Amino acid sequence: MKLKLFLGVLGITVSTWAAVQSQVAENSQGSFAAQMSVAKNASLPMGARWSALLRAADVASSEQIEEIRTFTKSSDWYMRNAAMMALSKMGGDYAIEEAKKLVKDKALVVRSAAVDLIATKFTLENRKILADELAQNYNFKGKHSLWIRPQIMKHLASRASRDDRAFFARYLFDQDSVIEELAADTLEKITDVNFSGKDHLAQWKVFVKEKKWL
């Protein structure tokens, strides 16, 4: 659902694209400066600017990384997102370092992209960043999770170990049923305990309290 929504927002209408096609085509194989000119042009469609920034990253030198990094502070959410993607193409930890900041961005799509980037390098620091984001108010709508919380939980679950038992036991009692189920599934993988049936979640909750895993 989120992918369809994102691609729909990013899409360019045929008529709008025709109006700028000649400029973009002229710069499509151009220099870093030419690509950056398109990326900075706020009158162009977002897709054209997005693509130009990624092409700029392909031809950028190490001295030009800062110019791409400036887009992480763009007033346009899609260019902040594009900046992370562009930086990720340049190697090193450039993208991850910016993602650590943008994981708190006001735009959910940007936060979501930042989560995926942070998860590509699963250090203790990055794991803590993701775990902390589970509790942030801006990742809820009322009492309901936004899609980013299950996204975060899946990343954490994929690297879980027995040392994470207390963490996942705590999220058996989350207000979001999807998070609770992910926590239960993960506990089954990292412990030798399994419960079955429709009430397996309730059994897990009783069990962790009895074992004082919380």
Image (tube, rainbow, N blue to C red):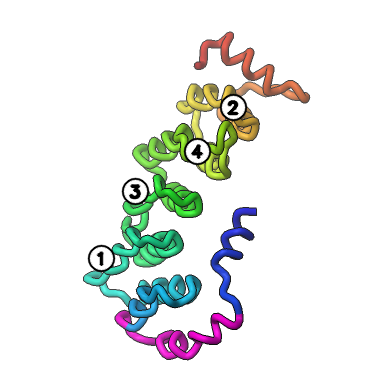
Per the model, the C-alpha gap separating discs 3 and 4 is 19 Å
Q: Position of residue 72 (x, y in %)?
A: 34, 59
- Pick the residue in front: 210 or 40: 40
Going from N to C along the chain, the mark reached first, 4 or 1, is 1
In the orientation shown, which residue stands out farthest toward the left? 63
Identity of the residue drawn at 34% across and 48% down: 101
- Neighbor class of circle 2 (other Cα within 10 Å; few <14, some 14-19, many 20+) is few
Going by the numbered disc 4, the residue's amino acid type is Leu
As helix, strand or loop, the secondary structure at mark 4 comes to helix
Residue bearing the label numbered 2: 175
Task: Report the disc number at residue 156.
Answer: 4
As helix, strand or loop, the secondary structure at mark 1 comes to helix
Residue 2 vs residue 30: left or right?
A: right
Residue bearing the label numbered 1: 66
In the orientation shown, which residue stands out farthest toward the top? 210
Q: Position of residue 206 (x, y in %)?
A: 63, 13
Task: Report the disc number at residue 101.
Answer: 3
Residue 189 visible here: no
Residue 24 in magenta stretch:
yes
Task: Report the disc number at residue 17.
Answer: none
Going from N to C along the chain, the mark reached first, 4 or 2, is 4
Q: Is residue 74 above or below residue 208?
A: below
Q: Nearer the viewer, mark 1 or mark 2?
A: 2
Per the model, the C-alpha gap separating discs 4 and 1 is 31 Å
Going by the numbered disc 1, the residue's amino acid type is Glu
- Pick the residue in front: 131 or 44: 44
Q: Position of residue 1 (x, y in %)?
A: 65, 54
Q: Report the predominant secondary structure element of the magenta stretch.
A: helix
